[in-house]
Image (spheres, rainbow, N blue to C red):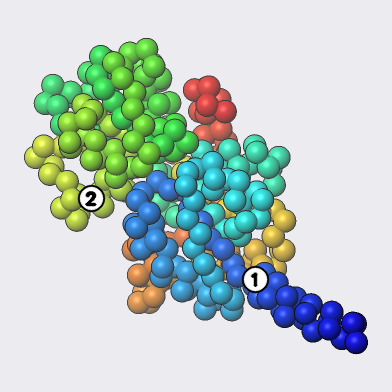
């Protein structure tokens, strides 16, 4: 009798555990507002559900470090990382994370410096000014802009009056437009999206410097993900096609022409820049 009762109690719990395991979880570094991240994720989640044959959920995180910990600790299965976040995740996990795809645009990504101050025409003009980066762990909003500043002979911590961290690319635009800082550095695709959507007055806020290109964002998984599952996921992302309504919707929101295969070696330059800037 006891055995039957135990079995009856155990079965629903076991079934629930199996159901929980079937949920495929996706996260992304919080480089934009939570509402924008959720909006961008929704069609992709629906697409992945149809391709993977399992329930897929978007799991937001509070900061960049949380996205790294979530993937390493297998709280999520797939993470959208910036190049620097991938490097951090690789270092933190002992190389046990794998970048599977990146946008075609991420092979030649750039950052922009923007200002509302007519006197600022070049990086040298930032001396003595208040300048905002995005999040401290942001590739395009902090690491690479800082790297190019150092190459130009400017040390933000010594040459700027104040270094601010807005936390996200859209917040950097708001800080510059609102006069909280004289200049800011951010992801070029977010800037171009704001301009296209008329969310920034370009008669008042303008780009005065665009960086050279570098590798940036990617979709990353744990090296412990089963090979067959990783292959299916990679194939699904690579199959997204702008010629289909669903593919166009997903790619437009991801600001991507298409996804292409990625590899860890692409981010050696970012790793070197991080070490050079004392950030890794």
- Coordinates of residue 9 in the picture (x, y in percent): 77, 79
In the rendered image of this protein, does residue 183 appear above or below residue 33? above
Q: Residues within 10 Å of mark 1 (few under 14, many from 20)?
A: few
Screen quadrant of the C terminus:
top right
- Is residue 115 something one can see in this rendering? no
Q: Which mark is residue 143?
A: none
Q: How far apart are the alpha carbons under marks 2 and 1?
A: 38 Å
Q: Which mark is residue 20?
A: 1
- Coordinates of residue 24 in the picture (x, y in percent): 59, 67
- Coordinates of residue 128 in the picture (x, y in percent): 25, 14
Q: Earlier in the sequence, mark 2 or mark 1?
A: 1
For residue 86, what is the image quadrant? top right
For residue 55, what is the image quadrant? bottom right
Residue lying at 54% horizontally and 54% vertically, measured from the top left: 79
Residue lying at 41% horizontally and 68% vertically, measured from the top left: 42
Q: Residues within 10 Å of mark 2 (few under 14, many from 20)?
A: some
Residue lying at 24% horizontally and 35% vertically, measured from the top left: 175
Residue found at the far front of this picture: 1
Q: Is residue 177 left or right of residue 112?
A: left
CB-based contact (under 8 Å), mark 2 and mark 1: no
In this view, the residue in front, 203 or 37, is 37
Q: Is residue 144 left or right of residue 179?
A: right
Element under label 1?
A: helix
Q: Is residue 242 left or right of residue 178?
A: right
Screen quadrant of the N terminus:
bottom right
- Is residue 250 something one can see in this rendering? yes
Q: Is residue 247 left or right of residue 234?
A: left
In this view, the residue in front, 20 or 100, is 20
Q: Which residue is mark 2?
A: 194
- Which callout, 2 or 1, points to the residue nearer the camera? 1
Element under label 2?
A: helix
- Coordinates of residue 10 in the picture (x, y in percent): 79, 77
């Amino acid at each position: 009798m006891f055995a039957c009762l135990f079995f009856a109690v155990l079965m629903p719990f076991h079934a629930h555990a199996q159901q929980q395991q079937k949920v495929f979880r996706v996260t992304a570094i919080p480089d934009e507002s939570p509402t924008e991240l959720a909006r961008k994720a929704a069609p992709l989640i629906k697409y992945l559900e149809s391709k993977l044959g399992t329930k897929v959920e978007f799991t937001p995180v509070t900061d960049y470090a949380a996205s790294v910990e979530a993937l390493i600790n297998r709280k999520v299965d797939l993470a959208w990382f910036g190049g620097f976040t991938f490097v951090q995740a690789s270092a933190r996990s002992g190389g046990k994370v794998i970048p599977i795809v990146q946008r075609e645009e991420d092979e030649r990504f750039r950052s922009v410096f923007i200002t509302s101050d007519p006197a600022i025409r070049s990086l040298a003009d930032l001396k003595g000014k208040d300048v905002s980066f995005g999040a401290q762990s942001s590739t395009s909003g902090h690491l690479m802009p800082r790297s190019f500043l150092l190459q130009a002979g400017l040390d933000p911590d010594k040459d700027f009056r104040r270094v601010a961290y807005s936390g996200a690319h859209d917040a950097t635009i708001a800080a510059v437009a609102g006069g909280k800082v004289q200049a800011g550095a951010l992801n070029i695709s977010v800037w171009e999206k704001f301009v296209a959507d008329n969310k920034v007055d370009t008669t008042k806020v303008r780009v005065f410097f665009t960086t050279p290109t570098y590798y940036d964002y990617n979709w990353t998984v744990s090296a412990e993900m089963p090979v067959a599952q990783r292959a299916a996921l990679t194939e699904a992302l690579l199959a997204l096609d702008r010629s289909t309504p669903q593919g166009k919707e997903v790619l437009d929101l991801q600001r991507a022409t298409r996804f292409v295969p990625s590899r860890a070696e692409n981010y050696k330059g970012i790793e070197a820049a991080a070490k050079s800037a004392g950030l890794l």
